[in-house]
Image: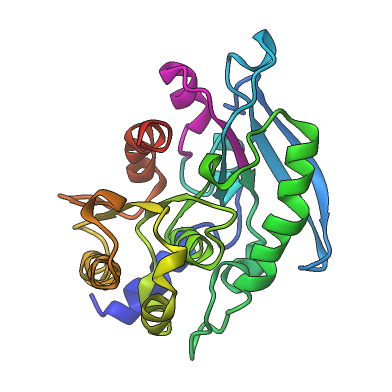
Amino acid sequence: MNSNILRILLILSLGLVSFPGKAQHTATQNVSTFLLEAPQLDTIKKIWVYLPLSYKANNESYPVLYLQDAQNLFDKSTSYSGEWRVDEILDSLKLDLIVIGIEHGNEKRIDELTPFPHHKYHGGNANSYLNFLTQTLKPKIDSTYRTKIDSKNTFVGGSSLGGLFSYYALLKQPDIFSKALVFSPSFWFSDEIKPFTDNTELSKLKQIAIYFRAGEAEDETMVPLMKEIKERLINKGLTQDQLNTRSIPNGQHNEMAWSKLFPDAALWLIKH
């Protein structure tokens, strides 16, 4: 299949617009939502909050993972093509981790999650989205819930365009985030991600770590570009231990595939 056609299909399949349909709600009781004004984006964002099973039983503070595309994380009724089952997975692991899901902006999703514009698909407003996350959302979460606010305990993650954004956010603000889950990153969207990687000061990256995953049954550039970005980071001086990278045989570009990756990725966040 022509790669440009495939890329269009990938973007459409990633929840550019949500179609809730008639599916039953599957979010567990420890998932809640609230609305938050996003002045950086001139909109109102719906935010999803997962609190671990232990949260109400003690007074401890918890690390926080900020995930993109919240419609596809917790509830089948809001997902485009299945959910990650973040809440069920973390419940089963009994993992002490708060997860904050940020709903994508539907037709504005490309604009929000891409740091550099594409000649055809445009976009390139990720800095505004990142400013919303760090300047508006994170302070709200830290003031509302018992969180560990330091970068060592603050993580970011996503898939496809969300994976691209999460990679960018980590390198852009390692003072805020220390680790990123980068699933099926859309590094093809703009070649500018390469000089951005090369020009990021190594001194800012000594404490970061990235969990890279991509499927071998995705777009033909997905795995090679992921490996190229990893090599660029290695050339800058990052270590293999900082870059947990693997391609998945027969791995596809959908929520089911990313859901299968999430248990190991969540454990890596906490235990790495």
Looking at the figure, which quarter contains the C terminus?
Answer: top left
Question: On screen, 122 above or below 45?
Answer: below
Looking at the figure, which quarter contains the N terminus?
Answer: bottom left
* Quarter of the image where one finds residue 222: bottom left
Instruction: Tell me what residue is drawn at x 52 percent, y 81 percent.
Output: 116
Q: How many marks?
A: 0
Residue 184 seen from this side: yes
Give the image location of residue 143, x and y in percent.
80, 37
Give the image location of residue 28, x and y in percent.
60, 21
Instruction: Tell me what residue is drawn at x 40 percent, y 65 percent.
Output: 10
In the image, 256 versus 223, the foreground residue is: 223
- Start-end of magenta stretch: 83-100
In the image, 90 versus 219, the foreground residue is: 90
Q: Is residue 224 magenta?
A: no
Residue at the farthest left position: 249
- Left or right, 32 with reference to 14: right
